[in-house]
Amino acid sequence: AGPFILILLQKEPYMNRLVRALKARHAILETRVLEEQRRPKPDSIRLKALKKIKLQLRDQIASLERLIAQPAAAVTKRFPQKRQTLTS
């Protein structure tokens, strides 16, 4: 495995922790959205902002989960290593 793959594999536990943290934040935002919607006069601007942040988190989570799920071979195809050649 090339150095990029080794770095990626070493970072997998970190990436898993990051995904868990993002999911926790996503759940907090979901609660805030529901709380805002239950108010007698919900603030539409606040709701829109909360939902936008929640959507961004969902996209980040999905990207990280795809990256974690990729086998090493798929990553090397995606990021091929350049061969070093000796020139005189």
Image: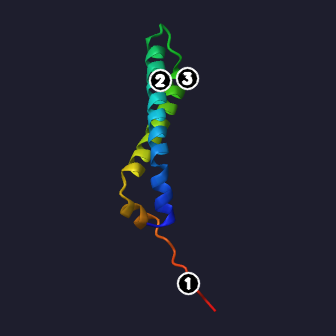
The disc at residue 16 is: none
Residue assigned mark 3: 45
Give the structural element (helix, strand or loop) at label 3. Answer: helix
**Place of residue 84 in the rendered image (x, y in percent of width and height, measured from the top left):** 55, 79
The residue positioned 50% from the left and 62% from the top of the image is: 4
Residue contact between numbered discs 1 and 3, judged by CB atoms under 8 Å: no
Quarter of the figure with the N terminus: bottom left
Q: Mark 2 belongs to which amino acid?
A: Ile
Compared to residue 49, the image places residue 77 above or below, namely: below
Frontmost of labels 2 and 1 is 1
Residue 17 vertical placement versus 67 (above, below) = above
Residue placed most toward the observer, 53 or 10: 10
Q: Give the residue displayed 36% in from the left and 50% down from the top.
A: 69
Using a 10 Å C-alpha cutoff, classify the residue at mark 1 as few (fewer than 14 neighbours), some (14 to 19) or many (20 or more).
few
Say whether disc 1 or disc 3 marks the residue closer to the N-terminus. Answer: 3
The 10 Å Cα crowd at callout 3, few under 14, some 14 to 19, many 20 or more, is few
Residue 85: x and y, percent?
A: 55, 84
Upstream in the sequence, badge 2 or badge 3?
A: 2
Q: Which residue is mark 1?
A: 85
The furthest residue to the bottom: 88
In the displayed orientation, state which residue is furthest to the top: 40
Residue visible at 49% across and 29% down? Answer: 25
Which callout, 1 or 3, points to the residue nearer the camera? 1
User: Which residue type does callout 3 highlight?
Assistant: Ile
Front tag of 2 and 3: 2
Reading the image, the residue beneath label 2 is 28
Image position, residue 57 (x, y; %): 48, 36
